[in-house]
C-alpha cells in the first residue's frame, strides 16, 4: 500500500443461517451479518455504527461460512474465538431476526437525570461518605404521589390525610392497644348504636383500603390529638406550594409578589441540579471511602492498562461467574483479552479532537485503592460509545451499571468542551421486545436509528410503533430513502495480494470470480462512502 494512509481492512461474512438468540432463547431465530475487522479507523467505525453496525458483544456468525479462518477455528474447536472478540463487527438483519436491535443514542448535552438516576447518585455518595448502602430502594422510575399532610414525613400514596388517621389514636392509649385492629366489646356496642348514616359510611369504608377505612370509622372513645397538625385538603396544600414557588421565582426575577422591585436575589436559584453537581459533591473530610475513575487506553495498551490488567481481569472473572453463571474455567484470561481488550480501533489524534485522542479505552472505578468496576468504551469523532460494563459482585447493590452510564454521559459532556462535535452517548442496542433491555430508553433525550433510512428519530415517536410490531420503520416519510446507499459497486475498494484496487479492476483481473453478489450485499450494508474507503479483503 502506498504512503502512510490508514485503512480499514475487513473480511465480510454473510448471514443466511439463523442461530441461538441470547435474548429470547430462540434456537434459530437470530440473524445478522458480520465482518472480521483486522484494523479500523474511528471515522469508518463512526459511519458504520450510524448504519446499525456494532463491535463486540457479538452473536455467533453463520456456521455455513466457508472462509478459511472460520474453517480453521472450527477444526481446532475455537469457533467462539470469532464471535467473542472485540474485533468482530456485526449488523442484525432487522426485518428477519427474532429480537430486532435498534441503535440508540442519548443527547448528552441535554440530558437531565431522572428521579431514579438521582437516587442512584445519592446512594453512591452516601456510601462514599458514610459507608451506608440504603436498603429497600430500587432504580425504577416512579412519580411520587402528593403528600396531603401539612408537615414533614414520608410521602404516602393515600389521598386520606395521614395526620387524621394518627389523630384517631390517643396519646394516653398504650401503643399495643392502638395497633390492635380488633374492636373491643365496649367499642362494638358503640358502633352498633351508631346512627344509620355512620353505619352506611362504615359499609362504604369496607370496600376501600384499610388505612382509608380507619380514617372514615373513628374508634369511639379516642379524641383528636392536640399535639398533631390540623388536617388540610390536598388542593389547599398544592395551592400553597404553588404560591411559594411563584414567590421564589418572583424574588429571583427581582420582583416581589405585590409588583414592587425585590431585593437582589441571593445565591438560592431555581435552576435544576446538573448531573455534574451530583457527581462532584464534595465528600466530608472524614468520609469512609474514596472513589477514583481512571481512563486507560486498551489498544494499544498503555503502561497503566498493563499494570492493572490482572486486577481488572479478576473482577471480570467474578462478574461472569456471579452474574452470567459461567463456570470458573470459562472466563479465561485469553477470552477476556479477546473480548474486551482487543479492538480494531487504532489510537488516533486530531487537532480538533479530545486531548486523550480517539480509540478504545477502559474506565476503571477504583474504590479505596482497588478496582470495583470497569466500563469499556470507544471514543469516536461524534460520540462516546459504550461497549461493556462489568463490576465486582460484592458491590452490586450500588447499581454500578446505571452509575457508570451516568458517569460516561458526564464524561461525554467533558470531552465535548474540547471537541464540539463530540456530543452524543451511544448505549449500544435498544431491544424493545426484551423488557430487560428497555432501560436504555430512560436516558433521554434519546434517538433510535431508523433501520431503513438510517436517520435518527426521537424515541418518543418510535415507541408506539414498536408496541405494534417488533420491527418498524421510524422515518414516516414514504419517499425518504438511504442517502448513502450503494450506487456503484465497481468503486468499492478491495485488498488483493497486498494491493488496493477498485472492485471493477479486481473483477476484470479475476474473470472467473463469482463473488459479485456477496460484494454487492456488503456494499449495500456499509454504504457507498464506506465502501470507497474500507478495504474488503479478497483471497
Image (tube, rainbow, N blue to C red):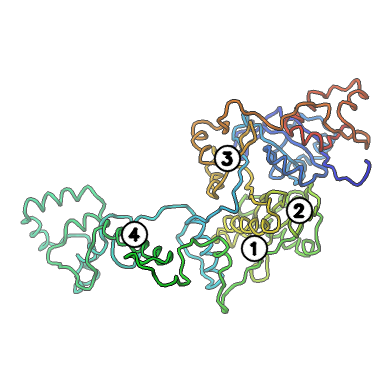
Q: Along the line of sight, which residue is nearer the eye, 320 or 454?
A: 454
Residue 407 found in image quarter:
bottom right
Within 10 Å of disc 4 (Cα), the crowding (few <14, some 14-19, many 20+) is few
SS category of the residue bearing label 3: loop
Q: Along the line of sight, which residue is nearer the eye, 402 or 370?
A: 402
Q: Where residue 518 sits: x, y (%)?
A: 79, 26
Q: Nearer the observer, disc 2 or disc 1? A: 2
Q: Give me the C-alpha separation between circle 3 and circle 2.
A: 28 Å
Q: Would you name the residue on which mark 2 appears?
A: 358
Q: Nearer the observer, disc 1 or disc 4? A: 4
Residue drawn at 58 percent across, 26 percent down: 478
Q: Along the line of sight, which residue is nearer the eye, 75 or 243?
A: 243
Q: Of the residues under marks 1 and 4, which one precedes in the sequence?
A: 4
Q: Of the residues under marks 3 and 2, which one precedes in the sequence?
A: 2
Q: Would you name the residue on which mark 3 appears?
A: 431
Q: Give me the C-alpha separation between circle 2 and circle 1.
A: 25 Å
Q: Would you name the residue on which mark 1 appears?
A: 372
Q: Give me the C-alpha separation between circle 2 and circle 4.
A: 48 Å
Q: Nearer the observer, disc 3 or disc 2? A: 2
* Contact, mark 2 vs mark 1 (Cβ under 8 Å): no
Q: Nearer the observer, disc 1 or disc 3? A: 3
Q: Of the residues under marks 3 and 4, which one precedes in the sequence?
A: 4
Q: Is 405 situated left or right of 136 in this image?
A: right
Quadrant location, the N terminus: top right
Amino acid at each position: 500500500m502506498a504512503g502512510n494512509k490508514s485503512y480499514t481492512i475487513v473480511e465480510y461474512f454473510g448471514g443466511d443461517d439463523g442461530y441461538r438468540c441470547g435474548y429470547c432463547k430462540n434456537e434459530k431465530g437470530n440473524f445478522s451479518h458480520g465482518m472480521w475487522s483486522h484494523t479500523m479507523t474511528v471515522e469508518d467505525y463512526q459511519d458504520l455504527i450510524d448504519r446499525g453496525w456494532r463491535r463486540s458483544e457479538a452473536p455467533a456468525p453463520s456456521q455455513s461460512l466457508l472462509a478459511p479462518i472460520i474453517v480453521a477455528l472450527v477444526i481446532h474447536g475455537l469457533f467462539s474465538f470469532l464471535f467473542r472478540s472485540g474485533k468482530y463487527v456485526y449488523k442484525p438483519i432487522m426485518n428477519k431476526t427474532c429480537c430486532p436491535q435498534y441503535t440508540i443514542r442519548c443527547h448528552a448535552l441535554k440530558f437531565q437525570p431522572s428521579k431514579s438516576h438521582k437516587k442512584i447518585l445519592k446512594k453512591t455518595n452516601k456510601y462514599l461518605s458514610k459507608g451506608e448502602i440504603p436498603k429497600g430502594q430500587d432504580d425504577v422510575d416512579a412519580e411520587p404521589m402528593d403528600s396531603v399532610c401539612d408537615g414533614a414525613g414520608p410521602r404516602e400514596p393515600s389521598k386520606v390525610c395521614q395526620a387524621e388517621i394518627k389523630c384517631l389514636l390517643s396519646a394516653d392509649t398504650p401503643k399495643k392497644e392502638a395497633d390492635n385492629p380488633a374492636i373491643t366489646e365496649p367499642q362494638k356496642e358503640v358502633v352498633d348504636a351508631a346512627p344509620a348514616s355512620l353505619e352506611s359510611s362504615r359499609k362504604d369504608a369496607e370496600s376501600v383500603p384499610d388505612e382509608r377505612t380507619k380514617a372514615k370509622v373513628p374508634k369511639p372513645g379516642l379524641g383528636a390529638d392536640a399535639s398533631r397538625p390540623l388536617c388540610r385538603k390536598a388542593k389547599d396544600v398544592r395551592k400553597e406550594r404553588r404560591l411559594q414557588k411563584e414567590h421564589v421565582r418572583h424574588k429571583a426575577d427581582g420582583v416581589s409578589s405585590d409588583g414592587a422591585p425585590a431585593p437582589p436575589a441571593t445565591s438560592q436559584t431555581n435552576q435544576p441540579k446538573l448531573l455534574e453537581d451530583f457527581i462532584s459533591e464534595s465528600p466530608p473530610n472524614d468520609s469512609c471511602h474514596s472513589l477514583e475513575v481512571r481512563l486507560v487506553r486498551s489498544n494499544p495498551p498503555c503502561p497503566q492498562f498493563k499494570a492493572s490488567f490482572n486486577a481488572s481481569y479478576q473482577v471480570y472473572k467474578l462478574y461472569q461467574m456471579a452474574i452470567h453463571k459461567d463456570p470458573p474455567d470459562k472466563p479465561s484470561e485469553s477470552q477476556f483479552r479477546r473480548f474486551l481488550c482487543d479492538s480494531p480501533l487504532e489510537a488516533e489524534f486530531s487537532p480538533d479532537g479530545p486531548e486523550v485522542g480517539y480509540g478504545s479505552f477502559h474506565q476503571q472505578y477504583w474504590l479505596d485503592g482497588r478496582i470495583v468496576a470497569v466500563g469499556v468504551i470507544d471514543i469516536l469523532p461524534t460520540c462516546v460509545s459504550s461497549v461493556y460494563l462489568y463490576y465486582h459482585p460484592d458491590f452490586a447493590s450500588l447499581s454500578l451499571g446505571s452509575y457508570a452510564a451516568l458517569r460516561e454521559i458526564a464524561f461525554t459532556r467533558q470531552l465535548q468542551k474540547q471537541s464540539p462535535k463530540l456530543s452524543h452517548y451511544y448505549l449500544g442496542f435498544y431491544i424493545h421486545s426484551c423488557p430487560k433491555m428497555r432501560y436504555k430508553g430512560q436516558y433521554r433525550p434519546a434517538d433510535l436509528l431508523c433501520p431503513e433510512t438510517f436517520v435518527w428519530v426521537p424515541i418518543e415517536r418510535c415507541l408506539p410503533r414498536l408496541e405494534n410490531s417488533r420491527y418498524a420503520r421510524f422515518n414516516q416519510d414514504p419517499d425518504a430513502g438511504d442517502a448513502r446507499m450503494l450506487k456503484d459497486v465497481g468503486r468499492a475498494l478491495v485488498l488483493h495480494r497486498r494491493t488496493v484496487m477498485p472492485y471493477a479492476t479486481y473483477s476484470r483481473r479475476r474473470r472467473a470470480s463469482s463473488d459479485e453478489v456477496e460484494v454487492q450485499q456488503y456494499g449495500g450494508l456499509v454504504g457507498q462512502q464506506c465502501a470507497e474507503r474500507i478495504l474488503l479483503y479478497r483471497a
